[in-house]
Image: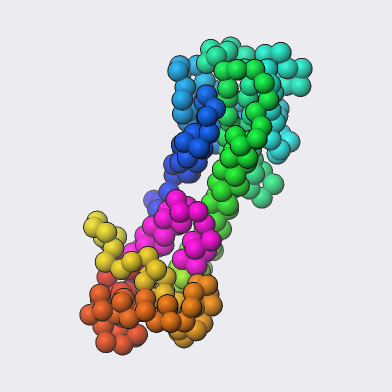
Amino acid sequence: MSSAADLLRPPDDDAVRAELRATAALTATSVVFGGQVHGDALVIDELVGARTNAMRGLVVASSAGLGGAAIATGVPRSVADYTASSSITHHYDAAVLGEGLHAVLAVPVVVSGRARAVLYAGDRERGPIAGRVADTMLAASRRLAAELAVRDEVDRRLRLLAARAALAGTPDTNSRLSEQLRDLHAELRGIAQSLPAGARDRLRAATDRLAALVSGTPAPGEPIDLAPRELDVLAQIALGCTNSEAAARLSLRPETVKSYLRSAMTRLGAHTRHEAVVRARRLGLLP
């Protein structure tokens, strides 16, 4: 049976794929590729711009090749001429040459001191990969690391709440659990504001599933009636925050919070803040 964390966490390979595609659109490098690290090995399963399948499905061991060196050290590694380089092992020359690559940059995605993925940029010309391409790859690595860290924290908290729920048996305990879930929901929507657009949308979608899971209401198949910012504000109001407190938590002006709250109340057909929260919970929009 799937846990709450399993149900809420979107596939990490989707996040890797999104970063690689975004990076490819911003750079003129020949190929952008990469994948997740499982145990001590990287599996390359995402490629943008490749002409062959020479590298697809390639399993790269820690310390082997360029990507393996990046995994082992936790820092970016690059070579201007892959097959001629003396700084790496040459376990994967056939695959790299099969794609016609010479210059390669490997950037590890490090979370809590461990490489979770590696993003590569490869060029069919010899020469160092630096400048804008390198900067773009590093930025992509940082964004992906931040998103994975948030997902890990969500999983950790949900596991903790699930463990507490397993021990729960009294109304008081269940009430405290519901309150903690609501705190988590509001905090995650607040965290989403600091993430890039793609990560922000995915985290908001996860909070929507959390709300539906807790309320027992199936997640709506159609777009949510409330705008993301209206839900952000309503999640804070559900915790008992004043407009000023909600504004401080969401880095908004109190007047802006008031405007979003008024709009949410109108959409929900509510006449008071409390009524808006109750109706949102019934709809599965809030936990």
> Which residue is depicted at the point 36% across and 71% down?
230
Which residue lies most toward the bottom here? 272
The residue lying toward the viewer, choosing from 16 and 23, is 23
Residue 42, position as x, y percentages in the image: 58, 31
Left or right of 63 on screen, residue 176? left
- In the displayed structure, 31 sits above or below 90; it is below
Quadrant placement of the C terminus:
bottom left
Q: Magenta part of the protein: which range?
A: 189-217
Q: Residue 274 in the image: x percent, y percent?
A: 34, 85
Q: Position of residue 41 (x, y in %)?
A: 61, 30
Residue at position x 46%, y 86% from top?
Answer: 242
The residue lying toward the viewer, choosing from 7 and 31, is: 31
Q: Is residue 176 visible?
A: no
Toward the viewer: 5 or 136? 136
Q: Position of residue 244 (x, y in %)?
A: 50, 84
As for residue 194 lying within the magenta part, the answer is yes
Q: Residue furthest right?
A: 86
Residue sitting at x 42%, y 77%: 256
Number of numbered callouts drawn: 0
Q: Main secondary structure of the magenta part?
A: helix
